[in-house]
Image (cartoon, helix red, strand yellow):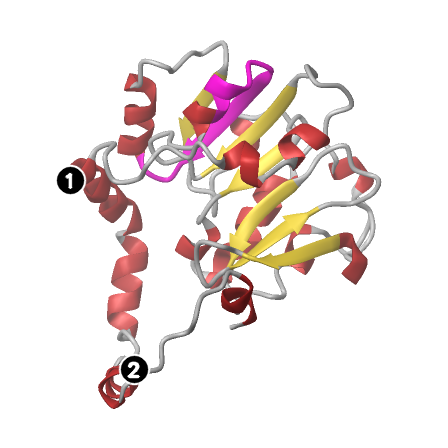
Amino acid sequence: MASLQRKGLQARILTSEDEEKLKRDQTLVSDFKQQKLEQEAQKNWDLFYKRNSTNFFKDRHWTTREFEELRSCREFEDQKLTMLEAGCGVGNCLFPLLEEDPNIFAYACDFSPRAIEYVKQNPLYDTERCKVFQCDLTKDDLLDHVPPESVDVVMLIFVLSAVHPDKMHLVLQNIYKCHGCSSELRQPWDKDDFAVTWDPWSPAIRVLLCHSGWSAVAWTWLTAASTSWAQAILPPQPLK
């Protein structure tokens, strides 16, 4: 509510009909349906991209404007930056970034093999600037494609919301191995180690991870219910 007021917007008052719809909408999907959707997730994403090809999402030309850390995390303007986009889709974020910044090399992966094929068919696809691959972040090892501790910046845009809550920690642990600052992450999270702001595009929380000792930043979108995620990415003991 406060974020809406800051933007000069007024919350709509729910009618009695709206309230009735909300009450009826609280029925949970059956366990059988949940398991079926989980098991067929990759097939469904492939069908989504088969129906929509590259036309569903608009290219995200706002990324560097919204995330100034892409520039501020560098020591000098033309410093090379290695990034990983987990859940790249058909490249709506990847290609605008590569076009805008010639000093970025990107690893990019997606759950859907069809989405990866669309990325490779894009005229802007250049193996000198990016490496793309299919990956199930909950079980496939990113280190099969990305050297350990080689990535400066990690992006997950509307990704964890598509992952079962019980598997979110697996995704974060997988990414953690690739992040270049992992050798410095040796203690549990402190409340001052990260900042939380409301995502301007959805009811989810945008979490910006930053630390005074890092030379890089990472960010992700998480649902408000997933507030314990920070413990998942850092082991309780120092890395060996």
Q: Which amino acid type is shown beneath numbered disc 2? A: Leu
Q: Residue at x 68, y 48 (%)?
A: 209
> Residue 196: x and y, percent?
65, 58
Residue count near mark 1 (Cα–Cα under 10 Å), binned few <14, some 14–19, many ≥20: few
Where 195 sits versus 49, above or below? below
Q: Residue at x 59, y 37 (%)?
A: 154
Whether the residues at callouts 2 and 1 have beta carbons within 8 Å, the answer is no
Q: Is label 1 in a helix, a strand or a loop?
A: helix
Residue pointed to by mark 2 = 22
Residue pointed to by mark 1 = 51
Q: Which amino acid type is shown beneath numbered disc 1? A: Arg
On screen, residue 88 versus residue 116, left or right, reads right
Dot 2 or dot 1, earlier in sequence: 2
Q: Residue at x 75, y 35 (%)?
A: 181
Residue 98 inside the magenta-drawn segment? yes
Tally the marks.
2
Residue 127 inside the magenta-drawn segment? no
Residue in the foreground of this view, choosing between 72 and 111: 72
Outermost residue toward the top? 128
Q: Is label 2 in a helix, a strand or a loop?
A: helix
Q: Which residues are magenta?
A: 97-112
